[in-house]
Amino acid sequence: MLLCLNATGQKVVELSQSDISEFVAAHNVWRTEVKAAPLKWNNAIQKKAEDYAKKMAISGRFEHSNCNYGENLYWFSGQTFTPSDATDSWGSEKSLYRPGTKISNTNYQDFGHYTQMIWHNTTEVGCGVAQSSHGTYVVCQYNPPGNFIGEKP
């Protein structure tokens, strides 16, 4: 990953092809376990995710973007990061999910990051990373989105 300091003191993380491959592969490890088709990288989604990661890094606010994609967010205070750090964190929610459970207004907060990663209808992912004095922000966005109330992943 290449980090560049801009005028706001925020570091723009330029993802290498290796980083992109790791994001996709790490997602697909979790998807393979449930026999979901592998995700493909989408550069347009990456740009939106990157823009939102930058916005959070500047503001220090950690909240969803309300975009038209599914979205997983990851934050940590350190500077060392790998794409697997984020995906494994989201995937750790698997232990809270009982296969076949429908998404509800109350349960998705327990395992919604995991179920978004494995959502069967989702076919594309794009991720962005930004750093500042507030920490490191990772945004992955998914098309089509998942976690629909009343549906199973």
Image (cartoon, rainbow, N blue to C red):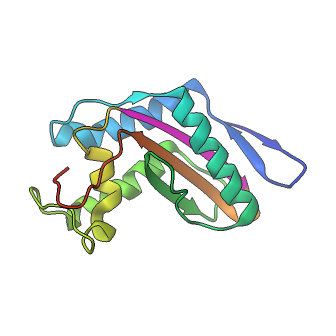
Is residue 46 toward the left or the right of residue 29 in the image? right
Q: Is residue 19 visible?
A: no
Q: Would you say residue 109 sits in the magenta stretch?
A: no
Q: Quadrant of residue 91?
A: bottom left
Q: Which residue lies at the image location 26% right of the left edge and 45% below the top edge?
A: 118
Q: Quadrant of the N terminus?
A: top right
Q: Residue at x 44, y 45 (%)?
A: 69
Quarter occupied by residue 16: top right
Outermost residue, bottom side: 106
In the rendered view, tell whether residue 55 sits above or below residue 69: below
Q: Position of residue 73 (x, y in %)?
A: 50, 57
Left or right of 140 on screen, residue 51: right
Taking the spot 44% from the left edge, 54% from the top edge, the residue there is 72
Q: Main secondary structure of the magenta part?
A: strand
* Place of residue 10 in the rendered image (x, y in percent of width and height, measured from the top left): 79, 53
Residue found at the very far right of the displayed protein: 7
Q: Is residue 64 left or right of residue 51?
A: left
Q: Which quadrant of the view contains residue 35?
A: top left
**Is residue 125 part of the magenta span, yes or no?**
yes
Q: Is residue 5 visible?
A: yes
Q: Where does the image place residue 114, in percent across and percent down from the top left?
A: 30, 55
User: In the figure, 109 relative to 112: above or below?
Assistant: below
Residue located farthest toward the left when viewing the structure as drawn: 100
Q: Which residues are magenta?
A: 124-131
Which of the pair 8/65 is nearer the observer? 65
Number of marks in picture: 0
Residue 111: percent from the left, percent from the top? 28, 63
Left or right relative to 96: residue 134: right
